Image: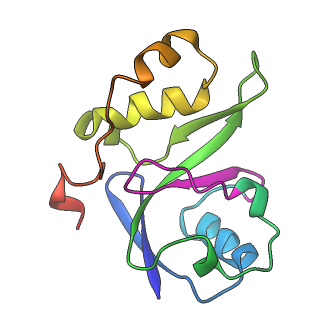
Amino acid sequence: MFVTILFGDSRMEMFNLNCKLIHFIHCLKEKCSLDFKDCVDLLDSSGRVMNLEGKQHSMALASSVLVERQYYVLLQVCRDPDTGGPKYVSLLNNFSQSHPELTELLRKLSNPNNKQDRKTRGGRTRSKNIFTTNKSHR
């Protein structure tokens, strides 16, 4: 049971899901050369954030949160100084150029109370799989 994490300059790393979530997140930060104090999360292929921040000390298996053989984009979670809410930054360089919907999606996730976003949300449909347009990662 494994997942593939996309980050950096088109880098991919495979991670074992048959471990506790606390160890999975620790290994993720270590392999991706992140500071252990950084808050990280993952974005799945449907554009859903996995909300690892609240589970970073969990003893549940990583397989209870993540789906095996899936691709995830590594995100850094920061606090927005204006709203105090989470702000998501993709740690996959140039992904927003090959997948511009990611930039828009992360902006909306980082600012869910924006009135303009609420007006346009109902009329738009989101792509089913944000990783399908660039198959070079697979």
Residue 16 vertical position relative to residue 12 in the rendered view, above or below: below
Relative horizontal placement of residue 54, taking residue 98 as reference (left or right)? right
Relative horizontal placement of residue 24, taking residue 42 as reference (left or right)? right
> Could you tell me residue 30's position as x and y percent?
63, 69
> Furthest residue to the top?
116
> Furthest residue to the front?
122
Q: What is the quadrant of residue 132 in the picture? A: bottom left
The question of residue 43 being in magenta is answered with yes
Report the span colored magenta. 36-52
> Could you tell me residue 67's position as x and y percent?
48, 74
Q: What is the quadrant of residue 80 in the picture? A: top right
> Could you tell me residue 138's position as x and y percent?
23, 68
* Residue in the image at 54% along x and 63% along y: 32
The question of residue 115 being in magenta is answered with no
* Residue in the image at 38% along x and 78% along y: 69
Relative horizontal placement of residue 27, taking residue 96 as reference (left or right)? right
* Colouring of the image: rainbow
Q: Main secondary structure of the magenta part?
A: loop
